[in-house]
Amino acid sequence: MDDLDRAIILATQEGMPLVSQPYHAVAEQVGSTPAEVMERLRTMLESGVIRRIAAVPNHYALGYSANGMTVWDVADERVDEMGERIGQLESVSHCYQRPRHLPDWPYNLFAMVHGHDRAEVERKALQIAELLGDACRAHEILYSTRILKKTGLRISG
């Protein structure tokens, strides 16, 4: 990573500029061209320096006031396969595996779903349960009680 890569990260780590041509705005800020900014970001994505470029919606502002982290006790030998399938569902914003903490916490697969109300979240969880079938032994829905600011790793100037 060179000085230009670092400048691009610093310019974008709080979010892309909310303008019609965000790569042009970043390029102007870091003294480069839009094409080079896009190429540098692509290279950093491919190498794993940055993980993703994506919109982070405010679900509450979009009317999704019921947000449930569904947690699942999935057979270890099937958790990768089932996680891939669940992560592709339109109703799942993110899905990942975490270690169990037995005997109190048997859950190893997490999938976040959003709904306009809890009934909608429960319907979406039922779809996941049907997809998991006998690979799932138990599940719960943990509802959000407040909004937390989501940020990733930041570097300082």
Image (spheres, rainbow, N blue to C red):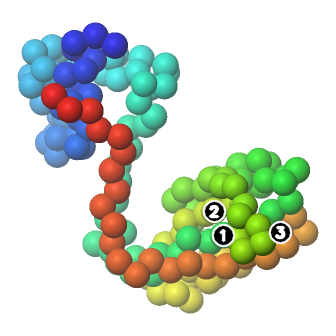
Q: How far from the left and from the top, in percent, is residue 24?
A: 15, 26
Residue 76, how many percent across, how many down? 84, 54
Graded by Cα atoms within 10 Å as few (under 14), some (14 to 19) or many (20 or more), the crowding at tag 2 reads many
| Amino acid beneath label 2 | Phe
Residue 65 position by quadrant: bottom left
Q: Of marks 1 and 3, which one's residue comes earlier in the chain?
A: 1
**For mark 1, does the 10 Å Cα neighbourhood hold few (<14), some (14 to 19), or many (20 or more) residues?**
many
Q: In the rendered image of this protein, does residue 113 appear above or below residue 28?
A: below
One can see residue 102 in this view: yes
Q: Are marks 2 and 3 in contact (CB under 8 Å)?
A: no
**Amino acid beneath label 1:** Val
| Amino acid type, callout 3 | Cys
Q: Is residue 44 shown above or below 155? A: above
36 is higher (above) or lower (below) than 55: above
Q: Say whether marks 2 and 1 touch (CB < 8 Å).
A: yes
The residue located at (25%, 21%) in the rendering is 6
User: Eyeballing the image, is 123 above or below 92?
Assistant: below
Q: Which disc, if any, is residue 110?
A: 2
Q: Which mark is residue 71?
A: 1
Point 20% across, 32% down: residue? 156
Quadrant in which residue 103 is drawn = bottom right
Q: Which residue is mark 3?
A: 136
Sequence-earlier tag: 2 or 1: 1
> In terms of image quadrants, where is residue 4?
top left
In percent of width and height, residue 94 lies at: 54, 56
Q: Residues within 10 Å of mark 3 (few under 14, many from 20)?
A: many
